[in-house]
Image (cartoon, rainbow, N blue to C red):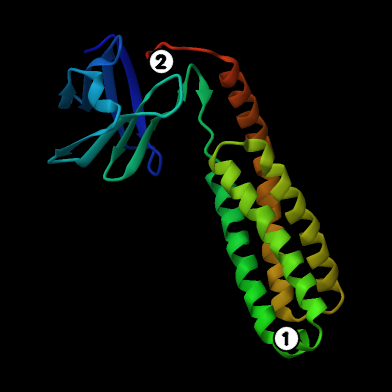
Amino acid sequence: MGSFTKIYYCIRNPNKSLVLTWDIGYKNVTLLDGDRVVHNWDSPVVFEKGTFIHDERLGQIKLNFTERRPLMLELRVEGKRFAPRGVKGQAEFRLQGPKTIFWIMFTSTLLYTVYIAYQYRDILSWEPHILDRFFVIFSIIAAIYLFTAIMLTLKKYWTFFIGFGYFTLSTFLFVYDAFSGSNVWWILLTLARLAILVYLIFQIKTVILAMKAKRNSDYKESTVLDDEF
């Protein structure tokens, strides 16, 4: 056993876990599946570009360093990410749900733009200035969702409030139209947006905690590879 030990849990299934142990400088890294030694790596050099092994029980295993400091080992088994519950008591924030929602909203905005342009192609051809305004408006909407999704992927958590703010405003407009006598499909769409809005509201606390955790880690300057867990 090395001087440092971390339990890595499967992101998709927290009931599955593996253990990594190592000595200072990520030397003598050992991967354990329960009491079974899966593999041992003597040198940390192999983790810079990532190393692959195949285990009869677990399948393909990839181990590599993370891209940002403080450097940590990232573990994947059959493409599924395993990660420690936290570093020095701090939780990890992935915000996968909000990212997925904003990607979906970006895609649906593009599809809706194409649908409207086709559905009203005759009117738009008669009034080209309407077509220009139409594409400008929907391009801005799509850009808001795209920007938010990309920046959340890059862990710029504050951008959540840009996408959330516009989604909230537009949802209120959907509600107004629904009460103005829209068809049943529009009402169902409005209810779906309200459900998504409630979910995003519950995510605000997580976003704020993620912002604080990232701000604290940005101020921390470290060149030490190992952090005790």
Mark 2 neighbour class, 10 Å CA radius: few under 14, some 14 to 19, many 20 or more: few
The foreground one among 182 and 139 is 139
Q: In this view, does 21 lie to the left or right of 143?
A: left
Q: Which amino acid does label 2 sit on?
A: Phe
The image quadrant of residue 37 is: top left
Q: Work out which residue is located at the far front of the displayed protein and give it.
A: 128
Screen quadrant of the C terminus:
top left
Establish if 170 lies above or below 52: below
The foreground one among 159 and 199 is 159
- The residue pinned by badge 2 equals 229
Disc number for residue 120: 1
Measuring from the top left, give residue 14's x and y in whole percent: 39, 37
Mark 1 neighbour class, 10 Å CA radius: few under 14, some 14 to 19, many 20 or more: few
Measuring from the top left, give residue 214's x and y in whole percent: 59, 26
The foreground one among 29 and 224 is 224
Screen quadrant of the N terminus:
top left
